[in-house]
């Protein structure tokens, strides 16, 4: 009879309960890691798209003017989920000689909500002060 039991055990096919539990544990851990990686990738892609839109808005605001008045350029507004603000200040003027080209440093800040945080991008450039028209005085 003992020989018959040994033959039956050798002929058994399938997995033991312990082997099944280990396989399920490994599969659960693997699926959890894949889920976390995919979720992080989707979130990063969404953040990147919003940042790209904010940069495009800032660049289009900067390209909307080729010069500023002597008062500068200070403005703000909203476009979709994006809030923007433009601020300028006179740049590096050491003398006030009439007729001398003056530059303004233009700073554009675009911000948007991202969950509980507020994200923002900021771009800067220099624009010349508009030359006076006929009959106007230099300032």
Image: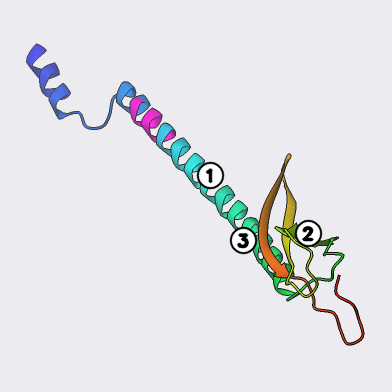
Give the residue displayed 26% in from the left and 32% down from the top: 14
Q: Position of residue 117 (x, y in %)?
A: 72, 41
Task: Name the mark nearer the viewer: 2 or 1.
Answer: 2
Tell me: 43 left or right of 33.
right
Q: Position of residue 130 (x, y in %)?
A: 79, 76
The residue that disc 3 covers is 52
**Camera-side residue: 116 or 23?**
116
Is 25 magenta? The answer is: yes
Question: If the image is split into quadrants, where does the C terminus sit?
Answer: bottom right
Tell me: 102 left or right of 34.
right
Which disc number belongs to residue 88?
A: 2
Q: Secondary structure at mark 2?
A: strand
Give the residue displayed 85% in from the left and 74% down from the top: 138
Which disc number belongs to residue 40?
A: 1
**Camera-side residue: 138 or 24?**
138
Tell me: 25 left or right of 63.
left
Which disc number belongs to residue 86?
A: none
Residue 73 sits in which quadrant?
bottom right
Q: Is residue 102 visible?
A: yes
Q: Is residue 134 above or below residue 120?
A: below
Task: Name the mark nearer the viewer: 1 or 3.
Answer: 3
């Amino acid at each position: 009879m003992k020989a018959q039991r040994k033959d039956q055990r050798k002929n058994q096919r399938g997995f033991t309960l312990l082997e099944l539990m280990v396989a399920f544990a490994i599969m659960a851990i693997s699926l959890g890691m894949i889920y976390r990686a995919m979720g992080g990738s989707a979130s990063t892609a969404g953040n990147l798209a919003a940042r790209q839109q904010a940069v495009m808005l800032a660049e289009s605001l900067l390209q909307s003017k080729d010069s500023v008045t002597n008062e500068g350029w200070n403005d703000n507004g909203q476009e979709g989920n994006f809030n923007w603000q433009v601020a300028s200040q006179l740049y590096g003027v050491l003398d006030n000689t009439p007729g001398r080209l003056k530059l303004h440093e233009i700073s554009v800040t675009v911000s948007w909500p991202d969950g509980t945080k507020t994200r923002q991008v900021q771009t800067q450039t220099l624009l010349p002060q508009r030359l006076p028209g006929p009959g106007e005085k230099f300032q």
